[in-house]
Amino acid sequence: MTDTRGQQPPYETYSGALPGERQGAQQQGGPYHPPQAYGAPATGGQARGGNTGAVRRPRTGARTTPRTRKARLRVAKADPWSVMKVSFLLSIALGICTVVAAAVLWMVMDAMGVFSTVGGTISEATGSNESNGFDLQSFLSLPRVLMFTSVIAVIDVVLMTALATLGAFIYNLSAGFVGGVELTLAEDE
């Protein structure tokens, strides 16, 4: 078997023939070079796309389960701008969840009659059954609770974004001294 330049290649690709069969060598008239092993990685022409129809067969007694590749990597730097964007979006999502959870909790507690029961207990304990006493139901109304929760959520968004960005700067400084966090990643097959 010769290539286009008239030279003899140092190998012959495996095309699925069994070890006793010399499929390519007898037809082409050249010497037969058996592959290293039927499960071995492709070399030469196969690696460059030479014989795409080749079938890989496992050696007898060889493992048929794929090997998991592992790589040790180091997080050398965290980009503060990307950390700020991601933390901003996550803190907005957490703020929205906080407001919705507060509204649902208030509605459940109001439906169970918690505010009227606790308000009646406070009125009896303080002895203020008249109109000038403390009214818990008007103090903990839904609009007032949602406004208070929204203010807390906005403060949370600002603080979480600022702290995450500051954390990225501090991580970059400390990674310059100690090298960063090392991770071991494994590939699933």
Image: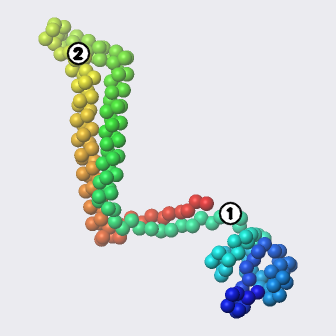
Between the C-alphas of marks 2 and 1, the distance is: 70 Å
Helix, strand or loop at mark 2 = helix
Residue lying at 26% horizontally and 12% vertically, measured from the top left: 120
Mark 2 Cα-neighbour bin, 10 Å: few <14, some 14–19, many ≥20: some
Q: Is residue 21 above or below residue 120?
A: below
Question: Which sits in the foreground, 40 or 131?
Answer: 40
Residue lying at 35% horizontally and 22% vertically, measured from the top left: 107
Taking the view exactly as shown, the residue that stands out farthest to the bottom is: 7
Question: Which sits in the foreground, 147 or 179?
Answer: 147
Residue 156 spot, x, y in % from top left = 26, 42
Of the image marks 2 and 1, the number of the one nearer the N terminus? 1
User: Which quarter of the image is occupied by the C terminus?
Assistant: bottom right
| Side (left or right) of 25 relative to 47 | right
| Side (left or right) of 141 relative to 57 | left
Residue 32 spot, x, y in % from top left = 80, 86
Residue lying at 65% horizontally and 81% vertically, measured from the top left: 44
Label 1 sits on residue:
65
* CB atoms of marks 2 and 1 within 8 Å: no
User: Which quarter of the image is occupied by the N terminus?
Assistant: bottom right
Quadrant for residue 138, please give it: top left
Helix, strand or loop at mark 1 = loop
Residue 55 spot, x, y in % from top left = 74, 69
Taking the view exactly as shown, the residue that stands out farthest to the top is: 130
Label 2 sits on residue:
122
